[in-house]
Image (cartoon, rainbow, N blue to C red):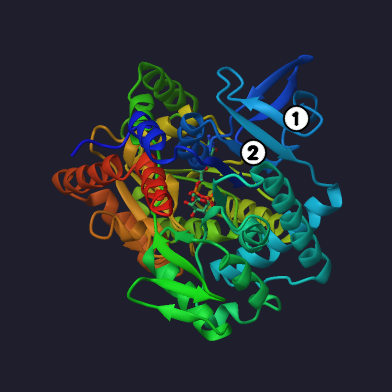
Amino acid sequence: MPHETAETLRNLIRTRVRGHKFIAVSNREPYMHVWRNGELAWIRPASGLVVALDPVMRASRGLWVAHGGGGSADVAASDERGFVNVPPDEPSYRLKRVWLSEEQEENYYYGFANSALWPLCHVAYRTPIFREEHWRAYQEVNEKFAEAIAEEIGDDQAFVFIQDYHFALLPRMLRQRCPQAVIAHFWHIPWPNPEVFRICPWKQDILRGMLGNDILGFHIRYHGDNFIATVDRELEARIDRERAAIIYRRHMTKIRAFPISIDFEAVARQASSPAIDELIACLRKRYNLGEDIILGVGADRIDYTKGLPERIEAVNRFLERYPEYCGRFVFFQAGVPSRTHIPEYLRLNEEVDEAVRRVNQKYGTADWCPIIFRREHLPLSELLAWYRMARFAIVSSLHDGMNLVAKEFVAARADNGGVLLLSRFTGVARQFRTEAVLINPYATDDLASAIHRAIVMEPEEVRRRMTRMREQVREHNAYKWAADIVRKLSKFV
Ligand code: GDG
């Protein structure tokens, strides 16, 4: 079967979305403007979402509404209503930047979205923080986005595609203002079971907000089923299990699974380029990594859902139980600092530093350091070089909607080598059930054994598993994710 590409996605939009405005909504903007040596420049943040949605937006000549201000020159590059044409080098759609006050950003983004909803939905044993002022800002900002979008829709026909947990209230607010719009919402993080969700003081408002959607997407069925069970418990709604739909106040919301992905071909191509070969040679030299060194890798935002302390503890246990690997094993971890405004994240950073220091002190020698930890946003090229060098990668999330690092590791391995140690609690574990070595990050001894198993796995088995994972991601790529959603949306016309 031919795979979905940016081109097939564009054609789909041209045939199916005609006559409708296409509006994407996300907290983070797809392009940021910055000052570089006094000149206006721009960056496209490396995000799976932008990869998948950019072709949709280009083909539909749509509008992307997002919180502006991520770049130092965002204000200067936009007109007085916040509009700017993008992509800056080939304008084909518009970005509308919604400006928030510092206080709004603090309370809505760091507050309700990331200190209440994020821990609530992930169940990573961090207590969600529910504060009135956070909730008020969350409502205010959702309202502000609803106004900004409704202004653009007017009485026209429109498809609105909302992203993530920053906008749980927006669907209903928008439906009230523009009843003719077709609204879809993709929730990028897990949805917990009703027992967990019931502690949220504003649970019914959140559910009512989300039931303003026509389609509500999750990465996997399980999260959708949890959502349905939560509504069943909290609201007087009719559940149509056969159609996986909820009817609330005479409006139907369909709950569907759309597993997000990456641009497989692009990642694979870049990973196999001569530039990466050179980078590998440089890194081997810089870190003194001979071909005989067994290398493991991890790359994550530094977030307590990603299981970083658990992973380091497992490396510690591995070296304790298999001391014969001392001196010929190195674990490389890249960690992007994230949400450091939130005290919980600062604590986690210290915890990770301390754990790495302990292991390195305990086992390290004058010419060997077991863990290399780089706390920075590495260029994708460098990540790909590490992926290619690795004997195995560890994704040890305590809970994760999907996890794209796993898919990027797989895409980088054109040699069909490398073992993926993958937490059972990621969405991607449903796709790689039999090909990855599934792990429980809470069970340190098991994870330590899994590291050993990855190291001694027969090359034939490694190849068989990796080949199958690569086929999966090649077929279920980011364009397919977007195309499946567009197809569903277009059925509402
Ligand atoms: C949320 C959900 C869901 C990481 N370090 C570096 C770097 N990265 C890139 C990875 C990957 C991305 O960041 C992380 O994506 P994930 O999917 O792993 O995780 P979240 O950020 O938590 O994303 C998640 C996702 O939304 C999409 O729906 O899969 O479950 O939590 O692309 O490569 N990129 C670069 N340098 C780094 O050091 N360049």
Q: Quadrant of the N terminus?
A: top left
Counting other residues with Cα less than 10 Å from the Cα at mark 1, is it few (<14), some (14-19), or many (20 or more)?
Answer: many
Q: Amino acid at mark 2?
A: Glu
Q: Nearer the viewer, residue 212 or 445?
A: 212
Which residue is situated farthest in the front direction here?
Answer: 155
Which residue lies at the image location 56% right of the left edge and 68% below the top edge? 211
Is residue 174 left or right of 110 when viewed as pictured?
left
Q: Nearer the viewer, residue 223 or 421?
A: 223
Is 279 located above or below residue 171 in the figure? above
Is 402 located above or below residue 95 in the figure? below
Which residue lies at the image location 48% right of the left edge and 67% below the top edge? 253
Question: Which residue bears the numbered disc 2?
Answer: 29
Q: Is mark 1 within 8 Å of ligand 1?
A: no
**CA–CA distance between discs 2 and 1?**
10 Å
Is 47 located above or below residue 58 in the figure? below
What numbered label is drawn on residue 356?
A: none
Q: Amino acid at mark 1?
A: Asp
Which residue lies at the image location 65% right of the left edge and 33% below the top edge? 95
Residue 141 quadrant:
bottom right
Residue 470 quadrant:
top left
The reply to whether residue 212 is in sight is: yes
Q: Are dots 2 and 1 in contact, CB under 8 Å?
A: yes
What secondary structure is found at the residue carrying circle 2?
loop
x and y, in percent, of residue 260 in the image: 41, 49
The reply to whether residue 342 is in sight is: no
x and y, in percent, of residue 474 in the image: 28, 39
Question: Which residue bears the numbered disc 1?
Answer: 74
Q: Is mark 2 within 8 Å of ligand 1?
A: no
